[in-house]
Amino acid sequence: MTRVAGIDCGTNSIRLLVADVHPETGELIELDRRMTIVRLGQGVDRTGRLAPEALERTFAACREYAEVIRELGAERVRFVATSASRDAENRDEFVRGVVDILGVEPEVITGDQEAEFSFTGATGELRGAETYLVVDIGGGSTEFVTGDRHVEAARSVDIGCVRLTERHIRHDPPTAEEAEAVRADVRAALDLAAETVPLTSAGTLVGLAGSVTTVAAIALGLPEYDSAKVHHARISAAQVAEVTERLLASTHDERAAIPVIHPGRVDVIIAGALVLREIVERVGAREVVVSEHDILDGIALSVA
């Protein structure tokens, strides 16, 4: 077994996984998994730059993660940066900060690479004879990837809970017009994704990342977030629609009072839920299988 650390820095959150991984079998024993909402993509869609306060939040989390990595003695570290740092003019400032703190250079991966990691992480325990459509709804982008044991097609499109919230939602709760503007962007992005990925041919829809897991936790009626109960939960299309309508009608304070919603996700979960509902409807899926294992697990496996 090799002890590795994988870091996934997205538009909304930065996450760390330290694990012992068998490089041949792919067996992964988790030692530490944590997530911090840093909103690195704050304002990027509007300004094209990473905000100074967003960079400082991210670097603070990196300093915390560096200490965990040292304490657990990870032999190898891989830092993957996704949508927000792909889009930003001042991404060199971000790269320098990460190198100074962690000693490794962040790899600003393509959307297709992001999709590959997501698929590998999400389906490792599900591998069977059927075809999966894995959907990773992030803060700035959403990845679609289909395959069985291997990736057959993948596409990343620029829709995510942070990007769409900043672009369209001005009222609390959103107006009908704002919600429809979000849906319209998602439908257009799905048209783009469908040019590369067959969205309706997979046997199982697998959903990843915070928007999906949060909707699932609400649908399950959990009194507090429990990753063991969320992982591999099957949420029906009707439940996805019901939770989305509930969120659309809620105020910020009402959402904040739902114990399974992370405080850093309260203001963007409506857009995330809308993205998920549009995907479920386009795919024609009766349910979505929720996975807690995602791009982070794929990164850790790739290190070994």
Image (tube, rainbow, N blue to C red):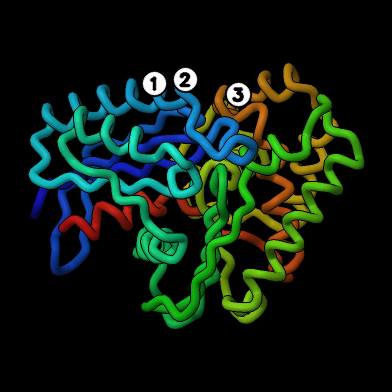
Identify the element where label 2 is drawn: helix
Q: Residues within 10 Å of mark 2 (few under 14, many from 20)?
A: few
Q: Residues within 10 Å of mark 1 (few under 14, many from 20)?
A: some
In the picture, residue 62 is in which quadrant?
top left
Q: Is residue 267 above or below residue 168?
A: above
Q: Is residue 80 above or below residue 131?
A: above
Q: Which mark is residue 259?
A: 3
Identify the element where label 1 is drawn: helix
Do we see residue 213 in this rendering?
Answer: no
Mark 2 touches mark 1? (CB < 8 Å) = yes
User: Could you give the CA–CA distance between mark 3 and mark 2, rounded to whole angstroms?
Assistant: 27 Å
Residue at 39% from the left image edge and 53% from the top image edge: 295
Residue nearer the viewer, 117 or 261: 117
Q: Which mark is residue 53?
A: 2
N-terminal-most mark, 3 or 2: 2
Residue 192 position within the rendered picture, expressed as x and y whole percent measured from the top left: 66, 70
In the picture, residue 243 is in which quadrant?
top right
> Which of the two marks, 1 or 3, is nearer to us in this view?
1
Residue at 55% from the left image edge and 25% from the top image edge: 264
Residue 81 position within the rendered picture, expressed as x and y whole percent measured from the top left: 37, 46
Residue at 78% from the left image edge and 34% from the top image edge: 169
Q: Is residue 223 left or right of residue 244?
A: left
Q: Which mark is residue 56?
A: 1
Do we see residue 267 in this rendering?
Answer: yes
Residue type indicated by callout 2: Glu
Q: Residues within 10 Å of mark 3 (few under 14, many from 20)?
A: some
